[in-house]
Image (cartoon, grey):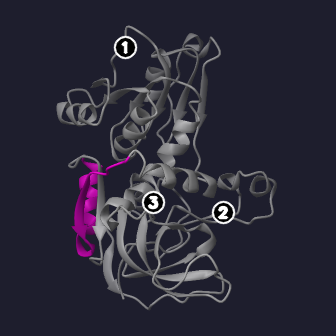
Amino acid sequence: MRAMVLDKIGEKLTLKQVPLPIHHEQEILIRVSACGICRTDLHVVDGELSSPRLPLIPGHQIIGIVESKGENVFNFKVGDRVGVPWLGGSCGQCSFCLSNQENLCDNAKYTGYQLNGGFAEFCVADSRFCFPVPQDYPDVQAAPLFCAGLIGYRALSKTGQAQKIGFYGFGASAHILTQLAVYFGKEVYAFTKPGDEKAQSFAKSLGASWAGGSETLLASALDAAIIFAPNGALVPLALKNTKKGGTVVCAGIHMSDIPAFPYDYLWGERHVCSVANLTRQDGEEFLKLAPLVPIKTQVTVYPLEKTNEALEDLRNGKFEGAAVIQILDV
């Protein structure tokens, strides 16, 4: 099969012919139709996430069709359309797994990181960590739901009953989450790179109440803020814009160092927390909500052989919404 392979950190992916993967008793073999591009893929390729299994096929927002399955797979049948997220498996036995915090499992495995992912014609996944794809979504529109959407949903849950929420960084997650937040009757304030009028206009078109540069100090404080951009300098900026008792959520898997800031920014029982991965419960809840909103993903589509171009376009902010690698037109 054809696959885009990462052989060495910091290098471009290479299009190769590799053997068809073999599934085990609880796994499914998936004929991949589409796989979303995520900033986490950049963190893996650039070495900011330090433990990839090399050589590696990245990609963790996978949509495809079950080609065959192991003898202990009971939740999917051959021919089913399936989605594969970042969390590819956990131990099932530790205190985290037993308390519905499998996202914190120390022995978790991640798709496109320790497990080969979806920048390929086929992949193998643990069926227990896969989800049915909502029926109303074409494959390329569904792919971003499986990381950008799921992580955004988990981040939003950390804001509790907050009504006025700031989103710092307006990429794949924020463009999905804005639609969900507006559906819930919340006010969205979109903070972009200073002067990025295109992104600001995009945010407003999705229902944001306000959009402006990331260094803007609002006249009226936010109830909460979610930081999607991997820039630690945004944390003190978000704290300054958040009212006492409010929460700043760091939603990325990687972020540059947070600079020192005055304690006064944090004082007043403000909270800073991170979001780590996702749970299967997040997936079940969010994928039921997405068609009700309905969330509409805006995607730029690339063929498999142009995956490196897609990664560079993501790095340079050349598209709005999300990017998706289309492997098979289903």
Q: Disc 2 marks which residue? A: 108
The residue located at (24%, 75%) in the rendering is 305
* Badge 1 density bin: few <14, some 14–19, many ≥20, Cα 10 Å: few
Of residues 71 and 262, the one nearer the viewer is 71
Vertically, is 77 above or below 208? below
**Is label 3 in contact with label 1 (beta carbons under 8 Å)?**
no
Tell me which numbered mark, 1 or 2, is placed earlier along the sequence.
Answer: 2
Q: Quadrant of residue 57?
A: bottom left
Q: Which of the two discs, 3 and 1, sits closer to the camera?
A: 1
The residue located at (42%, 55%) in the rendering is 145
Q: Disc 3 marks which residue? A: 44
**Is label 1 in contact with label 2 (beta carbons under 8 Å)?**
no
Left or right placement of residue 263 versus residue 289 in this view? right
Q: CA distance from mark 1 to mark 2?
A: 39 Å
Q: Amino acid at mark 1?
A: Leu
Residue 252 in the image: state x and y as whole percent: 49, 44
The quadrant of the picture occupied by the C terminus is bottom left
* Badge 3 density bin: few <14, some 14–19, many ≥20, Cα 10 Å: many
Q: Is 272 one of the magenta-colored residues?
A: no
Q: Which of the two discs, 3 and 2, sits closer to the camera?
A: 2
Magenta residue span: 294-316
Residue 11 visible? The answer is no
The quadrant of the picture occupied by the N terminus is bottom left
Q: Disc 1 marks which residue? A: 217
Q: How many marks?
A: 3
Q: CA distance from mark 3 to mark 1?
A: 33 Å
Q: Is 304 one of the magenta-colored residues?
A: yes
**Is label 3 in contact with label 2 (beta carbons under 8 Å)?**
no
Vertically, is 148 above or below 217? below
Badge 3 element: helix
Q: Amino acid at mark 3?
A: Val
